[in-house]
Amino acid sequence: MTFNPPPGIPLGSGELNQWRVSDSAVDLIRPHGAESPVTFPAQPQELRVDLRRTALIVIDMQNDFCTPGGWLHHIGVDVTPTRAPVIPLNRLMPELRAAGTRIVWVNWGNRPDRLNLSPSVLHVYKPTGQGVGLGDPAPLTGAPVLEKESWGAAIIDDLHPAPEDIHVDKFRMSGFWDSPLDSILRNLGVTTLLFAGVNVDQCLLCTLQDANFLGYDCVLVEDCAATTSPQFCTDATIYNVKQCFGFIARAPDIIDGLRNAAAPA
């Protein structure tokens, strides 16, 4: 029996994960698309990735973590280190967008009633049951901590999402639990993830680990990530990513790779 592929009605939200359908037949073979390879230095080995199957995951660059007046600042944490990713991210993101790589912002965005947050999640932010925790008004702004559409949950003013960027709310340290992140990435045909944001030893690392467990290729962009934790936490994170979960790269090297790939032969 000869199969005649449908003439051309795509069905699917991502161009690399689509069927083609007609009234008489369905073609389940996904389009491969032209590769868009780029090579850049990384640890422990140099990397070559397909930009069309790559996404940059930016985690928790939000007012409550990174801005004076936010939740971390209120509890006495110096938020200065969380600003370190701003300049390299603002240099890297336009280059990636121009190359067709998607930017995915993964941020806390809790329900006002907190019904999907377990006691173990709430305890992290309110360990004694006293003080200001998730959803409570921050004293300096009155904004509910990390509540969806609040000032505290908003992306900091120094970073500028583009209209085509993707936004995913998360409710755990990992961006994959109780969220649509995995479904979105698979519908986009993404296999390689670049990771940026804060805190590198907490939410970023948990999300990266889960990505590795789910079979994604994981690259921590070291200069686009930061933490308010002691330096040994960053050192341990970098060690474990290289040892167990993926690769370490830097934004200038990725940008050089992008520009070299785009240059005329």
Image: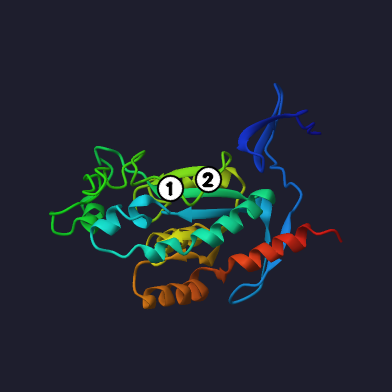
Q: Is residue 79 left or right of residue 218?
A: left
Marks 1 and 2, Cα distance to the nearest angstrom? 8 Å
Report the side of 62 relative to 55 (left or right): left
- Give whichever of 159, 262 is nearer the camera: 159
Can the viewer see residue 123?
yes
Pointer 1 with pointer 2, Cβ within 8 A: yes
Q: Nearer the viewer, residue 114 or 12?
A: 114
- In the picture, the disc for residue 161 is 2
| Residue drawn at x 24%, y 63% as measured from the top left | 76
Q: Which colour assignment does the render follow?
A: rainbow
Q: Nearer the viewer, residue 243 or 223?
A: 223
Disc 1 residue type (three-letter): Ile
Reply above or below: 10 against 88: above
User: Which residue in the structure is indicated by mark 1?
Assistant: 155
Q: Residue at x 42, y 64 (%)?
A: 205
Vertically, is 163 above or below 198? above
Local crowd size for mark 2, using a 10 Å CA cut-off: few (<14), some (14–19), many (≥20): some
